[in-house]
Image (cartoon, rainbow, N blue to C red):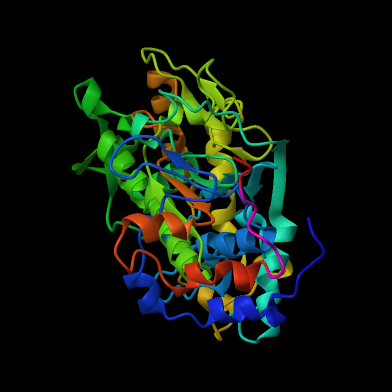
């Protein structure tokens, strides 16, 4: 890390902070051609006259803050607040306050992980004063960990990258961001919310949903006895695949929103780049002998030829074996935070948004019943024993998007495109962000 910069006094960040939202929205474009890049065929044959020039840590911190920065306390207004109030607000929304997407990124120096889940809020609105802008750097400094030296291991070839992206993706000088989402924890919590009505009404009133496995002839997914006991309503049939689709749709949207926010910040900062899905997650995450990729642990389930990414050991682990001895233990861990008292939340240094007493607020919070938790254990155990993985029909961890950032070679756009292909922030970027630096030219 460099010496701590003060974002509160950086004139270049002042311009970013005050940049028009709608100018960022209307000027958002995919701008792929950066310093050091080359197109060898097609209508835009061009070789950049400049050497690759990596993003500074300050520039990287701005993009990370845009993607998943800590913003303060969430509001959680409603008649059954649940446990959502015990979540930290971020720049991107998250269904039920899950925030189970973490941002990996690689550049010429290494592979990194920004641990947004460890960043605490300090007040209702995290950025109120000019001095608060220093937190952009402080959060980045305190919660970014280096996983390995050098650009991460991903060959510039198929099948890791699709052919049309080989010339540009993960090139020297670029920073490649990769949001990875865990489905397992909040599939467990969603199942609690759909099934446990004895602890208090959450997503359903009356009996809970009766989870059945459509791939096994609609047989009950380990929960038949709970319908017999009246906890679940046999008239409320919910196919297992649909249950999983709910949480996958909710959570995988986080990576897309993070990418959009980063692109808006690129426009404000004058950085080029774009977002795409032209890669094979199995290869990128490390599930083949081709390369190490992100280094995730993979487990090959029974009756499924494709290995399943379950986590990155010690950093981002799924709520399933091998990180837990069985699904019962995984369920216990996943629901543990749902019953945390607000007084304990505050003792951990967190801020609450409301002015009512914690005691009054918690009167409306649904609890967890012993029967409900045991029912969820049975459902999750069924999934794991039947399919050898959790979830049943989806990967545990998902990587759907790349967001790449690089310094834009504006001369390429001047040669081949009409005026308006880039904006004033790109034109003036080096003058503002790299004062006194010459753009290094190639020798040839």
Q: Nearer the viewer, residue 289 or 422?
A: 422
| Side (left or right) of 232 relative to 47 | left
| Side (left or right) of 426 relative to 142 | left
Q: Nearer the viewer, residue 228 or 264?
A: 264
The magenta segment is 435-441
Q: Is most of the magenta stretch helix, strand or loop?
A: loop
Q: Where is residue 443? Give x, y as percent.
A: 64, 42
Identified at 58% across, 29% down, the residue is: 296
Q: Where is residue 148? Give x, y as percent.
A: 71, 35
Q: Where is residue 118? Give x, y as percent.
A: 67, 56
Residue 304 lies in quadrant = top left
Q: Quadrant of the N terminus?
A: bottom right
Residue 435 lies in quadrant = bottom right
Q: Quadrant of the C terminus?
A: top right
Identified at 63% across, 69% down, the residue is: 433
Identified at 31% across, 47% down, the residue is: 246
Q: Is residue 433 magenta?
A: no
Q: Is residue 246 above or below residue 6?
A: above
């Amino acid at each position: 890390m460099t010496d701590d910069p003060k974002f509160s006094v950086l004139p270049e960040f002042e311009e970013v902070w005050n940049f028009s939202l709608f100018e960022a929205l209307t000027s958002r474009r995919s701008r792929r051609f950066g310093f050091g890049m080359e197109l060898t065929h097609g209508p835009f044959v061009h070789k950049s006259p400049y050497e690759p020039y990596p993003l500074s840590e300050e520039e990287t911190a701005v993009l990370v803050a845009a993607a998943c920065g800590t913003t303060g306390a969430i509001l959680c207004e409603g008649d059954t607040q649940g446990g959502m109030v015990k979540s930290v607000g971020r720049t991107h929304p998250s269904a039920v306050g899950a925030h189970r997407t973490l941002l990996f990124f690689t550049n010429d120096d290494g592979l990194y992980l920004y641990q947004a889940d460890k960043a605490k809020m300090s007040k209702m609105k995290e950025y109120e004063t000019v001095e608060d802008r220093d937190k952009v750097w402080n959060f980045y400094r305190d919660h970014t960990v280096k996983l390995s030296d050098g650009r991460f291991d991903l060959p510039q070839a198929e099948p890791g990258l699709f052919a049309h992206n080989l010339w540009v993706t993960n090139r020297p000088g670029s920073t490649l961001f990769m949001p990875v989402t865990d489905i397992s924890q909040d599939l467990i919590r969603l199942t609690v919310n759909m099934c446990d009505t004895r602890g208090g009404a959450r997503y359903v009133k009356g009996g809970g949903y009766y989870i059945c496995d459509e791939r096994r002839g609609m047989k009950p997914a380990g929960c038949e006895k709970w319908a017999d006991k009246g906890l679940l309503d046999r008239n409320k049939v919910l196919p297992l695949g649909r249950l999983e689709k709910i949480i996958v749709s909710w959570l995988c949207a986080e990576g897309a929103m993070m990418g959009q926010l980063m692109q808006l910040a690129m426009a404000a900062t004058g950085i080029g780049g774009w977002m795409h899905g032209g890669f094979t997650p199995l290869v990128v995450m490390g599930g083949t002998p081709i390369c190490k990729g992100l280094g995730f642990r993979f487990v090959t389930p029974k009756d499924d030829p494709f290995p399943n990414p379950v986590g990155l050991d010690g950093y981002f682990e799924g709520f399933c074996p091998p990180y837990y001895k069985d699904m019962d233990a995984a369920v216990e861990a996943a629901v543990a935070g749902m019953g945390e008292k607000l007084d304990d939340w505050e003792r951990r240094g967190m801020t609450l948004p409301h002015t009512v007493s914690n005691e009054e607020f918690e009167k409306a919070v649904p609890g967890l019943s012993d029967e409900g938790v045991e029912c969820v254990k049975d459902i999750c155990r069924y999934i794991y024993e039947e399919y050898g993985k959790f979830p049943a029909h989806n990967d545990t961890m998902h990587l759907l998007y790349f967001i790449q950032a690089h310094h834009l070679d504006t001369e390429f756009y001047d040669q081949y495109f009409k005026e308006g292909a880039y904006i004033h922030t790109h034109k003036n970027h080096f003058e503002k962000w790299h004062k006194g630096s010459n753009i290094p030219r190639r020798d040839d």
